[in-house]
Image: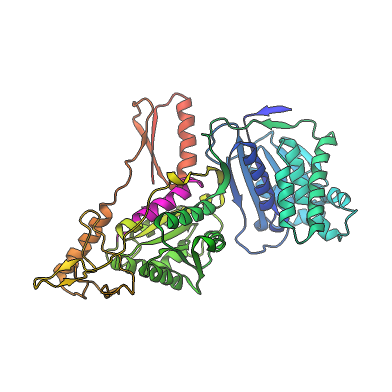
């Protein structure tokens, strides 16, 4: 047994080989073991790319350690390649000396020719710089499952569980959680559950008995975690939980108006499971309908959210401007991906910052909140909700695919740690006219926040006009007066400028740094890792990260 302080593993295969499930299960067991971790799922944009081709390769990378880590890593120590395409697509990322576990059953002449191998890379010496472990995963899996009443094709589907069992043995991962997960996932198909568990155990036993794996590795639990209850969490899941927590802390129903788009769809999937918390999800026919319904829900007194990615933001821009004009709270969650147009649907990019800041007609200022890690998406959702509710404004929440699909350990907060987000709806008249009459002015502002009152439709005496045409200050009547328009534009800007945000934390341990590394959003992990490396080399470097 060799002790290591960190390991980077990449599982790679066809989209149908179950690499995301395999990686997710290995990650869950690693989290329960107590390691710090960071993950990077990577999959093709095509719904089902041709089998055995380079565009169809799906992978899952996991970096785990006995200390605090911040990125999924660049160069894997271990590659599990389920076919020639997976090997060819990923070999360039491996450092010399890395371990490669290949499924030799898939290295047929036709499969190798499909990705441009004239000769078998397992035999031509091209992999001599690596520790190569040729394993007939498919054959071993089918052999292990021969007692089950399964077709060969059905048995072959469990080869990812065989690989998971082998890696679990190599790195001393717990097994109970995976077996429990399989029983639950296939509860309605107990034969399939039993077959997958048998394949998983066979992979473990293969590692234990074969002479090809003479060494196993141990990565101790991380000791730096503050006390608490932890779970592994992805960015989209953390964001979903943050939205639910915000609605409970505000004592408002949560409404999501959304149209499915990668990589934001998981938020719709997750929130739809939580009707017990007063969550209502609406899958609209298009992006415009999704945000229109959400803005209507905000007018009706809900904590309103719409989720999308880059192209969807473009379609929603007019309604975001309407929300600015109506001065209603609305969370616009943009899980960024590469563009322009359809761009790179499954690849991450911080591509929408300028669109979020300026991508609307007229002068329509909107605050932007950007989480920095998957777990931070929870707190960012609460912060975005605080701003939207207190200042009656739409708020952009800029996550991205790297955070959305990546995961890390998250300490579940205690209820008393969550902020109080309760709001007061308008209850009656708020203005006295010159003749002494008590009236309701929908655009009379809070002197501290400049927020207008939030009047729920149906409240007697609070009827008022809404719409996209400019309003008169105070009364809310339609106004084309240029002086009033100038005043309203400047007031809306002043409202956003006046939002209270925490002071920016500048990390400069000894106060002597002349160089500041400034970042925002999901660049936090790579930047912080680089700054730590420089400081260890004796370079005084300061860091600040915008939220």
Front-most of residues 315 and 23 = 23
Residue drawn at the location 33% of the way across and 67% of the way down: 323
- Is residue 117 visible to us here? no
Q: Position of residue 301 (x, y in %)?
A: 37, 66
Query: Going by the image, does 321 lie left or right of 371?
Result: left
Residue at image point 74% right, 27% down: 1
Task: Tell whether 24 sits left or right of 348.
Answer: right
Q: Is residue 59 magenta?
A: no
Q: Which x, y percent locates residue 430?
A: 20, 66
Q: Is residue 284 above or below residue 275?
A: below
Q: Could you tell me which residue is drawn at 43 percent across and 53 percent down?
A: 381
Compared with 520, 320 (above or below) is below
- Where 355 sits versus 104, above or below? below
Residue 371 belongs to magenta span: yes
Magenta region: which residues? 365-387
Question: Which residue is at the front of the view, 62 or 46?
Answer: 62
């Amino acid at each position: 047994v060799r002790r290591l302080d960190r390991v980077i593993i990449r599982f790679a295969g066809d989209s149908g080989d179950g690499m995301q499930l395999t990686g997710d299960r290995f990650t869950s067991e690693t989290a329960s073991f107590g390691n710090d971790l960071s993950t990077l799922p990577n999959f093709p944009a095509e719904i089902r790319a041709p089998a055995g081709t380079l565009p169809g390769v799906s992978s899952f990378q996991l970096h785990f350690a006995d200390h605090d880590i911040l990125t999924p890593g660049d160069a894997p120590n271990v590659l599990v390649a389920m076919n020639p395409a997976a090997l060819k697509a990923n070999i360039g990322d491996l450092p010399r000396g890395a371990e490669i576990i290949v499924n030799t059953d898939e290295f047929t002449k036709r499969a190798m020719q499909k990705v441009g191998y004239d000769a078998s890379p397992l035999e031509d010496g091209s992999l001599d710089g690596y520790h190569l472990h040729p394993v007939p995963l498919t054959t071993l899996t089918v052999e292990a499952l021969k007692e089950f009443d399964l077709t060969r094709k059905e048995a072959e589907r469990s080869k990812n569980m065989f690989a998971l069992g082998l890696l679990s043995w190599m790195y001393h991962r717990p097994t109970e959680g995976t077996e429990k997960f399989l029983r639950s996932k296939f509860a309605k198909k107990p034969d399939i559950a039993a077959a997958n568990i048998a394949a998983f155990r066979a992979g473990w036993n293969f590692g234990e008995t074969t002479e090809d794996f003479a060494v196993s590795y141990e990565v101790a639990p991380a000791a730096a975690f503050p006390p608490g209850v932890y779970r592994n969490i992805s960015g989209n899941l953390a964001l979903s939980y943050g939205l639910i927590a915000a609605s409970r802390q505000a004592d408002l129903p949560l409404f999501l108006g959304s149209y499915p788009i990668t990589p934001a769809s998981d938020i719709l999937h997750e929130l739809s499971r939580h009707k017990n918390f007063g969550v209502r999800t609406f899958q609209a026919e298009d992006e415009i309908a999704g945000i229109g319904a959400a803005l209507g829900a905000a007018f009706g007194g809900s904590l309103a959210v719409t989720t999308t990615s880059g192209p969807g933001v473009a379609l929603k821009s007019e309604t975001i401007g309407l929300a600015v004009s109506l001065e209603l709270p609305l969370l616009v969650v943009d899980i960024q991906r590469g563009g322009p147009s359809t761009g790179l649907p499954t690849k991450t990019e911080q591509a929408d910052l300028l669109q979020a800041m300026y991508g609307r007609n007229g002068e329509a200022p909107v605050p932007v909140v950007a989480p920095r890690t998957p777990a931070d998406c929870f707190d960012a959702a609460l912060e975005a909700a605080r701003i939207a509710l207190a200042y009656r404004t739409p708020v952009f929440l800029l996550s991205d695919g790297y955070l959305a699909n990546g995961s890390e350990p998250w300490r579940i907060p205690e209820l008393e740690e969550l902020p109080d987000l309760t709001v007061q709806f308008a209850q009656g008249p708020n203005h006295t006219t010159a003749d002494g009459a008590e009236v309701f002015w929908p655009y009379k502002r809070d002197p501290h926040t400049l927020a207008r009152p939030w009047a729920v439709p149906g409240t007697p005496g609070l009827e008022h006009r809404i719409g996209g045409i400019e309003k008169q200050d105070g009364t809310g009547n339609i106004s084309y007066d240029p002086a009033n328009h100038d005043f309203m534009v400047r007031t809306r800007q002043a409202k956003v400028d006046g939002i209270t945000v925490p002071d920016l934390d500048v990390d400069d341990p000894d106060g002597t740094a002349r160089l500041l590394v400034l970042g925002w959003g999901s660049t936090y992990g790579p930047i912080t890792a680089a700054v730590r490396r420089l400081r260890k080399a004796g370079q005084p470097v300061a860091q600040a990260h915008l939220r």
